[in-house]
Image: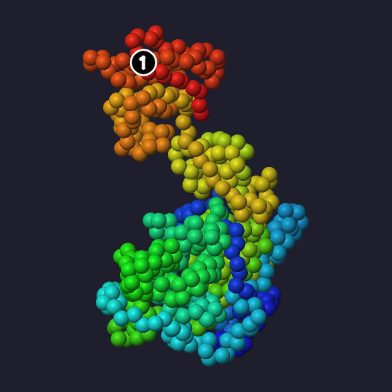
Amino acid sequence: MKTTRSLRRTFTLSTTALGCMILTACGSVYGPQSRMQLDMDKLLQTSPPASGNTLAGNEGKFLRGAVKQDPTSGLRVDIGAATINGTDAGAPALNETAAKPAEAASTSVANDEQDAKEAAGAPTDPLRPEATVDLSDITANQDLWGRVRQGFALPALESQLVLDHERWYTSRPDYVQRMTERASRYLFHVVDEIQRRRMPTELALLPFIESAFNPQALSSARASGIWQFMPATGKDFELKQNLFRDDRRDVLASTRAALDYLQRLNRQFGDWHLALAAYNWGEGNVQKAINRNARQGLPTDYASLNMPPETRNYVPKLHAIKNIVARPEAYNLTLTPIENHPYFVSVPIQRDLDASLAARLAGLPLDEFKALNPSLNKPVILAAGTPQVLLPYDNAGLFVHNLSNHKGPLASWTAWVVPRTMRPGDAARQVGMSEGNLRDINHIPPKMLVKAGSTLLVPRSGQREQDVSEALADNAIMALAPDLPPMRRVSFKAGKRDTVAGIAKRYRTSPQQIAQWNRVSASASFKRGQTVVVYVPTSKNTARRVATAVRHNGPSVKGRPQTRVVASATRSTARGNAIKGRPPVNRTTRMRVASAR
């Protein structure tokens, strides 16, 4: 926000051609909303193969030549529909419908225009509904780092580990710069919420340790977001994770949850260093370590506990970041300046909306839109599951203005519940798209079936034009199953030296599969006489192959296999023909074949 914005603004919207939007920063700390991690870089730039889509081929493009900046307020405004056109010869204009003769306007166009006018509400600050921001206040243009330093309250930690981490960061100035630049979008809101709760502002630096302030960060243990919530812990703190969104990556929702968690841990241990250790290691592990020291008569402070290396370095790493923020010049580092005002505001979304369209209407590149709304899993924003989007201060007013004047459909994608278990190719034909597109947009691996009740993202059509319901937006799931031929269950008694690996080789499958069927490890050996289960494809040669394989099982006498095979008559899936085994010849192990899918 530039210093030229000296006049006090309230968030009201002027609809005149050159009127500038004057915004207020008011709102509330919103709680969790209902929201599988997908490749947003690819998804958000993918358009369905639906004809008549006025946005097709134009995602992520926005001509700033149609936007003027008010010299007094610094706000950018759209000066009219006629000037917003695509530069590509084949790309339709944003307001293509407006150029058509009035007599050719259809009822659907009129409906689209009405939808656009109702698609968004007035922008608000998502943190403080009761406050009006006075941007003429000189503190709004002060460096946020000073505010962070003033709130430092953690007890000092003198440790060689702190010095080691200080040297590590000092030797990587480019890394520190990338972290602080990334933090510039979110740090004001994190600091604001921490100070509202009267917590030490060092905690605002914790995302530097957890994720380098990258909301898309995903650890090998599946922890996600700037605060690195594990799936189960996220659910404990009402961070919902579903097909369309993941609240662990939602900056505001995850910040609320992380601070709730840290406050709870501080109440439990009465010490911020122990609370931070518990945030990293788990409160149960920290409590066990405290109890163990107490039984031995040893101190129970953070530095005295026996902890794994990651946790032992966790708090020293935070103190190293704190020391660098406190005196960056002492470490020959420069912190990216961050102004002491909200970077983004919240715009309520009341109709389903393509993410690519939202970014264009706001005058933002897709990457920037995604960085502010990282919880999105799909290229469509569902109003029922994502009630608001975050946009930079200036772009919020531009978005509302352009959206209210948009002509054409708002969403090209919708959700479809698969009525029965089916192959992706069959599902693609039913919804009118190619199998490749269906697999790509829904991340369906090869050789998998989509199970009944799964939700797929598909193009909107005349039969599927309604906005997605709240129940579906909150509870959508994807369930897949291997696309395998019908299988029969085969059980037999293990021989003296049978192992999982040996039986897997005999039945031409993997040890892991045999282990899964029998609930043992892949390196296990079976006891003599233990029942072993395998599944084999159903075919006319099944009995012959099974009998051949089983003949090698069981104990041997004088070098000869002593196995008795009894093949029970089994019904074919198509006919009731019986499959008979070979006549028993001096064999003792019973083999049973049962139909199974």
Residue at mark 1: 588
Q: Residue 495's image quarter?
A: top left
Within the image, what quadrant is residue 331 found in?
A: bottom left
Whether residue 72 is visible = no
* Residue 189 in the figure: left or right of residue 524: right
Query: Quick check: 126 left or right of 300?
Result: right
Q: Is residue 278 visible?
A: yes
The residue under the point 40% across, 80% down is 336
How many dots with numbers? 1
Q: Using the image as rendered, state which of residue 82 and residue 404 is in the foreground.
A: 404
**In this rendering, is residue 159 above or below 306?**
below
Residue closer to the observer: 267 or 4: 267
Q: Indicate the amino acid at tag 1.
A: Thr
SS label for mark 1: loop
**Mark 1 crowd level (few <14, some 14–19, many ≥20, 10 Å Cα):** some
> 81 and 417: which one is in front?
417
Point out residue 287 in the picture as x, y percentages from the top left corner: 42, 66
Residue 549 percent location from the top left of the image: 34, 20
Compared with residue 409, is residue 511 higher up or lower down, i.e. above or below?
above
Residue nearest the viewer, comparing 429 with 579: 579
Residue at screen point 26% across, 15% down:
557
Residue at x-position 29% and y-position 83%: 332
Rendered location of residue 407, percent (x, y): 66, 61
Furthest-left residue in view? 558
Q: Is residue 455 above or below residue 470?
A: above
